[in-house]
Image (cartoon, rainbow, N blue to C red):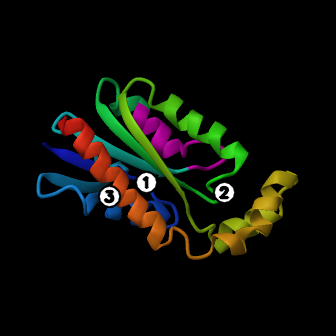
Amino acid sequence: MQALVAYFSQTGNTKKVAEAIFGELGEDAEIKALADVEDLDAYDLSFIGFPIIGFGPAKEGKSFLADHAAGKRVALFTTHASPEDSEPLREWLARCEEAASGAELVGIFDCQGELAEQIAGLLSESADPELRAFAEARSETIGQPDATSLDKARAFAREIMDAVKG
């Protein structure tokens, strides 16, 4: 089975998750930045990853899914600065799923990533109190995704591969 791990990573968090997933896929897999993927025609399964930015999928991920994922078997993975049990996260993940609505979506994985200091600085200057609250909680994100999160990403990859192979 030909598999692809394609990702957009703004700060390195999503890249770490992509590499963890890729490590579970075997020799018939490739890993590429989203910008380097022309189409998904050569793959039986594509893991597509991007961060959640602005309470939904990063525009790079959303555009890629709109342009390339229709009719393709896709598993999504996302990173975000929010705690994994936060209530708003469910809505944000639903927006990611909606962006992949043209694909055959076989799973979605998310984990917390570290909020970059530079981004926290920008958010702290926002008039939006929710964005300022994200900036203030930056210390809680340091070191994410951690080893446990990356192990969960590996398990996700194995589960998806097993399910797809049937």
**Where does the magenta region start and end?**
52-65
> Does residue 50 show up magenta in the picture?
no
Q: Nearer the viewer, mark 3 or mark 1?
A: 3
Mark 1 sits on what residue?
Answer: 8
Q: Tell me: 35 left or right of 14.
A: left
Which mark sits nearer the N-terminus, 3 or 1?
A: 1
What residue appears at the point 36 percent right and 41 percent down from the top-left corner? 75
Work out how far the residue at label 1 is from the one at label 2, CA to CA, in angstroms: 18 Å
- In primary-sequence order, the first of circles 3 and 2 is 3
Tag 2 or tag 1, which sits nearer the N-term? Answer: 1
Q: Position of residue 99 (x, y in %)?
A: 50, 31
Q: Which mark is residue 57?
A: none
- Residue 66: where, in percent of width, then height? 43, 30
Q: How many residues crowd mark 2 within 10 Å: few (<14), some (14–19), many (20+)?
A: many
Image coordinates of residue 160 in percent, x first then y, are 30, 44
Against 2, is 127 above or below? below
Label 3–label 2 contact, CB within 8 A: no
Horizontal relation, residue 29 to residue 137: left or right: left
**Labels 1 & 2 near each other (Cβ < 8 A):** no
Mark 3 and mark 2: Cα distance apart in space: 21 Å
Q: Is residue 62 magenta?
A: yes
Along the line of sight, the residue nearer the viewer: 100 or 26: 26
Of circles 1 and 2, the one toward us is 2
Disc number placed over residue 82 in the picture, else none:
2
Q: Taking 123 as reference, is 7 left or right?
A: left
